[in-house]
Amino acid sequence: MPKKLTAYFSASGVTAKAAKALADAAGTDLFEIKPAVPYTDADLNWHDKHSRSSVEMNDLSFRPEIAEKLENMDDYDTIFVGFPIWWYIAPTIINTFLESYDLSGKKIVLFATSGGSGFGQTAEKLADSCKGAELITGKLLNGNPDMDALAEWADSI
C-alpha cells in the first residue's frame, strides 16, 4: 500500500497547524523540517534587508542546514511538502530538505501558507531540487481548512 508523508517547515506555527490538519485528514505520517539554527523573530524580519531570512532569500543558492534527516524516506511514495511563502517562493530550507534525498519516482505535492501571495514561481524554483520526482503544485492552506475537503484532496493525488 502506498505510504504518504506530510513534511513541513514552519517559522511561526501557522504552517505547522496546516500540516498537522493535513496529516490528520489524510492519515499521513508527519515530519517537521527544522533548521539546525532556529530562526528568531529578528531573523524573520523581512522589513530588514540584513535579517537572516532576507539574506537567504536574496541568494537562492543558499541552503540552510536542517537539524535532522528523515531516516525512512524510502518508505514514502507521496510527500506533501509545506512551507510559508517567502518572497513569492518557498524558503530555501525546502531546497535543503528536498536535495537531502533521492526522490526518484516519488510524488512531491506542495502546499503553503501565505499572508497574501500565491505560489508565484515556487514550483519552478524547486524543480531542480527534486529531480526524478513528479512535482505537483498543491494548494494554499490558510485559515482553518475543512478536514473532509483536505482528505478528499489528498486522496485525489
Image: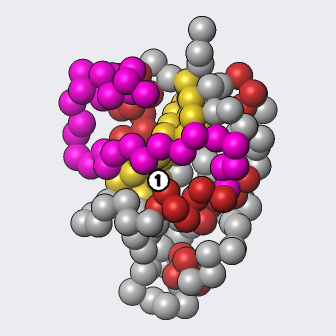
In the rendered image, the vertical position of residue 55 relative to residue 60, given as above or below: below
Magenta stretch in the rendered image: 129-157
Labels in figure, total: 1
* Residue at the limit of the structure toward the bottom, as seen here: 49
Q: Residue at x 42, y 74 (%)?
A: 87
Q: Which residue is mark 1?
A: 83
Q: Residue at x 49, y 91 (%)?
A: 49
**Colour scheme shown:** secondary structure
Q: Secondary structure at mark 1?
A: strand
The image quadrant where one finds the C terminus is top left
In the rendered image, the vertical position of residue 6 relative to residue 15, given as above or below: above
Image coordinates for residue 106, horizontal then vertical, percent: 64, 33
Amino acid of disc 1: Phe
- Residue 138: in magenta span: yes
Out of 17 and 112, give the one closest to the viewer: 112
Q: Residues within 10 Å of mark 1 (few under 14, many from 20)?
A: many
Image coordinates for residue 70, horizontal then vertical, percent: 72, 36
Out of 131 and 115, give the one closest to the viewer: 131
In the rendered image, the vertical position of residue 133 relative to residue 96, given as above or below: above
- Residue 150: in magenta span: yes
The image quadrant where one finds the N terminus is top right
| Residue 7 in sight in this render | no
